[in-house]
Amino acid sequence: IVEHRPEYITRVREFVQRGQIELLGGPFYEPILASIPRRDRIGQIQAYSEFLHVHFGTTIRGMWIPERVWEPTFAGDIAAAGIEYTLVDDFHFRSAGLADDELHGYYLTEDEGRLLKIFPDSEKLRYTIPYAEPDETIDHLRKIAETHTNAVAVFGDDGEKFGVWPDSKNHCYTNGWLRRFLDALVRNRDWLQVVTLGQAVQSVSPLGKIYLPDASYREMTEWVLPTEMQLKYREVVRQQEQSPDWPELKPFVRAGFWRNFLVKYPESDEMYCRMQEVSGRLATLRGTPEGAGNAVLAEAQTHLYRGQCNCPYWHGAFGGLYLPFLRNAIYKHLITADNLIEQSRSHTSRWVEAEVRDFNLDARKEVRLSGDRLMAYLSPARGGHIYELDVRQTQVNLLSTLNRRPEPYHLRVLEAGQRQQELAGRSELDINNSIKFKQPDLHQKLWYDAWPRKSLVDHFLVPGTTREQFEAGQGGISTFATGVYEARLRKSDSRVETILTRTGRVGDADVQLTKTVALDTQASGDLEVTYELSGLLPGVPVHFAVEWNFAALAAGASDRYFYDAQGQQRGPLQTSQTLEHCERIGLVDEWLGMDTAIDTSVTGDIWTLPIQTVSQSEGGFELVHQSACVVPNWRFTAPESGTWNVRMVLSIDTSVAQARQLGCGK
């Protein structure tokens, strides 16, 4: 906005200087405070306060807490960042034991001796503004004024309600709701004063002290529950709402805790752990005398902060985690920060290194193979998969995938689909004016995954399994896809590799699978993978497949496509197909400037299939492409030696992207 709409900044500055509005601070890039380290909480809040001071000439005293996710220790962190007061939902206060008539003011809270003033944000007002006629809000406020002296009622909510959410622009402006509401405030100004939080603090004393429990707004605490428990919770609430005792029971009914989004969605946890890794590395370097004033590391910190934005770390009423472009943006900033950290280390032009530690915070060791062009994270305890594959040049994680899993609203999708069928082929996608399908027949596309959609997912299949059966999750006859692998590391100055081994039952045989994944300075844009199967029963048919997934590459566009060994295009990246008797498949994203290819040493078939989710958004239910699944697979008869080998090379060409960055291409 500062760069592209400076006139807006000028206008807001005038409002601030006239005392018409108060600017609230907060963490600069809207992270959930619970999801980032304490040092970053304080740093983000201070950075935004400084930004607002520079551009608007005002001292920031209060702040907005993203999604009102609260934990008791935040009081100390917020105060340490220089903030005097904030607001959270009145739901938080009820959860601490306060009654409704005790919520018409503000309270003091503290942590480690640091005081913070905290206002209850009215849920009633969140729903009447702007969804009810203005008189309903005025009547509610009048009742409070008649029974409480110096009462303060707080409304704080998302600005999207006033023109961004579906139909809100028409409601608020075309139909005149906002004008009617402002007129109602003016008509009642003899008893109703509109003030800022800062003015309220200056004119009204606190109601007392309170320690709030972990909480967010009520809906958020429901969304975080596992799907089955969420459905049970809502049914219990629905039943109890019919009881005359519900008003007394309601304050004691609580659902979940925000951090469990990291459990509900492993993909969110992957971003979280990657962010924690970058933050820790950066803090270590900036804590040294050489790093304290380092401009490169300061730039890395900005990218880290941007990679902490809350939107893709959770999912509720809107897209959130389900939107690939949001996840891609997080990884773009985290990878950029990582690149800048490596730049500060003054590597040679070509380098590789390996590290073993608990990168994903599961009390088990993972392996990171990194170099000047690629970073691959492998989890021996989880199928020996590559679960993150970062391309440094384009700042893309090719494994920013998302599994298909049940969501509570899928029941509504199924019901709507059934209703659509009952309409005998009529084309309406707006079911009863409440359920909107952004694409047809979404109820037929609710498929769920039985294993993580990552890369180097190993499958032994029933001989003759078809692509259609595999796509439906059928045909597997082993536990290699999700089992625990043993891992070893070999490294030199020019080459690093990890050797992953697992023995498991395949039919009547105890088969040992060994896969080796390597990075080499001679080809640091390639990932070399070799497989050896031993212990096969001679003469027995075998059907073996290795699954790769590629996220961050858009589907449905003519400039994103598959190609074969002859260089011929084989359809867009959401194509479901079988390439027979081939040794190469490529994926091109011309917009990103990336050409990714898999070459195999043994001829076989290659399946491609789309991984697409059905999720809800503000515009209705939608089908979202999450990744292109590529599955080289081989049907063979086990040789007398009982051993079979294949070598694959994943090559990633970013020369087009590099040329663009240098100004040499389109």
Image (spheres, rainbow, N blue to C red):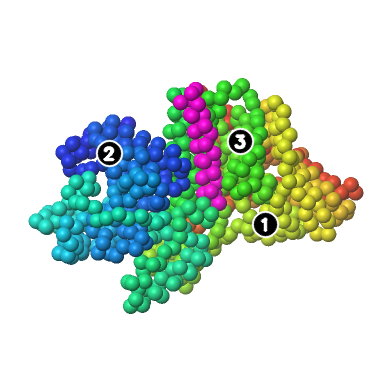
- Looking at the image, is mark 1 or mark 2 earlier in the sequence? 2
Label 2: which residue? 60
Q: Secondary structure at mark 2?
A: loop
User: Which circle, 3 or 1, is nearer the viewer?
Assistant: 3
Label 3: which residue? 375
Q: Is residue 66 left or right of residue 599?
A: left
Q: Amino acid at mark 2?
A: Ile
Q: Which residues are drawn in magenta? A: 265-292
- Closer to the camera, 275 or 436? 275
- Closer to the camera, 532 or 379? 379
User: Which circle, 3 or 2, is nearer the viewer?
Assistant: 2
Q: Amino acid at mark 1?
A: Phe
Q: Residues within 10 Å of mark 1 (few under 14, many from 20)?
A: some
- Looking at the image, is mark 3 or mark 1 earlier in the sequence? 3
Label 1: which residue? 470
Q: Secondary structure at mark 3?
A: strand
